[in-house]
Every structure is written in structure tokens, then in C-alpha cells.
Amino acid sequence: MEKNTTLSKPVGFLIAGFQSLQHVDYYFIFLVFVYLGTLIANFLLMSVIWLSHSLHTPKYLAVFNLSFADVCISTALIPKCIDHFLLGSKFVLYDSCLTQMFFFHYFYCVESLSLVVMAYERFVSICFPLRSSSINTNTRMMYIIFVSWVFILAYLIVLMVFLTKLSFCTLDPIIQSYFCDHGPLYRIACSDNTPNRTIGITYTVVFIFVPLVVIALSYMCIIAALLKIVSAEGRWKAFKTCTAHIILVVIFYIPVFVTYILAWIKTTIDTDLRILNTSLAACLPPLLNPIIYTLKTEEVMEQIKQLLRKQNVKPLK
């Protein structure tokens, strides 16, 4: 009887990508412009924060952290997509595949927890206005950000270690996704993938659902605090400082939340539709975040105007 050959480590993987979507090349050309816009917008925002001493506050440390994560997510994802689907190189070596997966998921988690950190900052500022400067210092914010990075690193190391224990039945297994994603990869393994499935579910709960719940609870407290403000103008002025963050939360979590809910209730989703949704959900927030935060935040706009004015001032001869 002929037996299947099981390989503990294949040479690499084939990235399937879209199955029947028409004019797919145009979509990835669109992603090229998304990537360039992401780099420009985020480096502009980070530069403004870096150069403006008045923005060296806990709030903008969190914004800088989010912006840095945006650049890293896009860099881990979009250039490889361009290589696979515009340049036709759909084969990716085993180590390269796991490297891309690590960096994408690492900075995706950083972005998710960054939104939680920003919600915490708004919660402290609005619910404890008289003590916010002593509660939330730059040092404390940097410590919170550092701890979140270390926590994510520890989790991702565990995830990667269990992935390396999987065995595959062919030299070049096909990943039904647009990049080296965790779920589509462990599902094609020949060996028992129960630990990987458990880690994947835990990942979703810890880095998607729990942050969303924490953010929702923080805003419930914020709304309760706002209702205690006597004047409507005062309430609106305080709430206005939260609008940019609320928009970022909606843009980041809702598409992913819907996708995971549909998957958990075992609703059949067309492969192309799933890839389109998840790719847009991963690529658009890093572009939109700095644009929305810049346009919706008066402090950032004011600092941009001041920096431009300084550039226009000519030295006296």
C-alpha cells in the first residue's frame, strides 16, 4: 500500500490569492497607491509629533505608537502582495512565510492594543481631569506601551513555535489567502493542529474582542462623566476630543469583527469576498488613521500650520 510522505518542513508555500475576481491586477495597483499614501501620511504625522514640543504628551505618545504600527503593518503586507500578484511570484519560502506572518500579526496586535491605550488616555483625561497629569505621565505611558509590546512578543513567540511543529504532506502546500496568514496555514497541515487552532481562537479573543470590550467600557465611563458636565458646550468640547479615536476604532474593529462572527457561526463566505474584506480591513486603516487623526485634531493641525510658518520665515540679511 502506498503511503503519503509527510514533511515536517516544506520548501515553501504557494499563495493562492483571489480565485475568480476579475481585473485583480487593478486591485493590487490600487494597493500600491494605498501603501505610498500610508507611508507619506504616517511619516508626516510622526514628524509633526517629533518636532512639536507641545505634542510630547501621553496622548501623542500613544498616537505616535499607533502611527509606527501602521507603517509596519503595511510594510509587512503590501510589498509582498505586489510581489505575489503583480510580479507573479506566488511561491514563498518557508522561513520567509513565517517571517511575514510574525511581523504582520505582531504589529496588527500592536495597533489593536494602541487603540486601547488611546482609550485609556481619554478615560483618564475626561474622568479624572484634575489628576490626569499626575496619573498619566509620559513615563507611565511609555511603560504601558513597552509592556504591551513585550506581551505581544511573548504571545507571538508561542504561536510561531507551535507552527514550526506542524507537518505537511507536499513540498509546496497551497495557502488559501493573499499572504502567509496563520489560520489558512495551520489548516493545511497533515499533523494535529488542535494547539494551533486553540492559539488562533485565543488570539482573536485577546487581541480583537477583549480590546473592543475594554474600549466600550471606557467610553461608557466617559459618557457618564460627560453627563455630569452642566453646560452642553462643555460636554461637546470634551466629547469632541474623542471623535477621532472613535472613528479609528470603528474602522479597525468592525470589518474584522464581522468576519470573525460569520466564521464562528459557520456562515459560508465566498473565498474572493473573504480575501477582499480582510485585505481591505488590513490595508485601509493604516492609511486612514493618520489622515483622520490629523484632520479631526485641532492640536495637530495647529502644529502643522506653525511648522509651515517657520519654514516660510526667511532669515534677515
Image: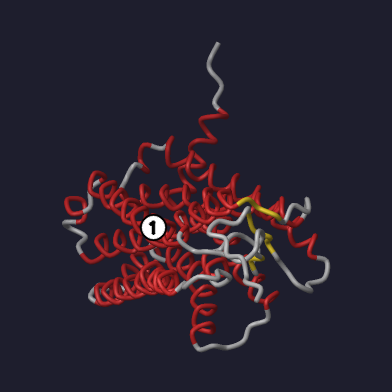
- Viewer-nearest residue: 310 or 165: 165
Which residue lies at the image location 50% right of the left edge and 42% below the top edge?
Answer: 304
Percent across and percent down for residue 162 are 42, 62
User: On the rendered structure, is 121 left or right of 102?
Assistant: left
Which residue reaches farthest top?
317
Which residue lies at the image location 55% right of the left edge and 56% below the top edge?
Answer: 9
Color style of the picture: secondary structure
Percent across and percent down for residue 73 are 53, 53
Label 1: how many residues lie within 10 Å, few (<14), some (14-19) or many (20+)?
Answer: many
Quarter of the figure with the C terminus: top right
Percent across and percent down for residue 157 are 39, 54
- Quarter of the view holding residue 228: bottom left
Quarter of the figure with the N terminus: bottom right
Element on which disc 1 rests: helix
- Viewer-nearest residue: 257 or 57: 257
Q: Provide the residue designation for mark 1.
A: 114
User: On the rendered structure, is 190 left or right of 83?
Assistant: left
User: On the rendered structure, is 64 left or right of 12?
Assistant: left
Disc 1 marks a residue whose amino acid type is Ser
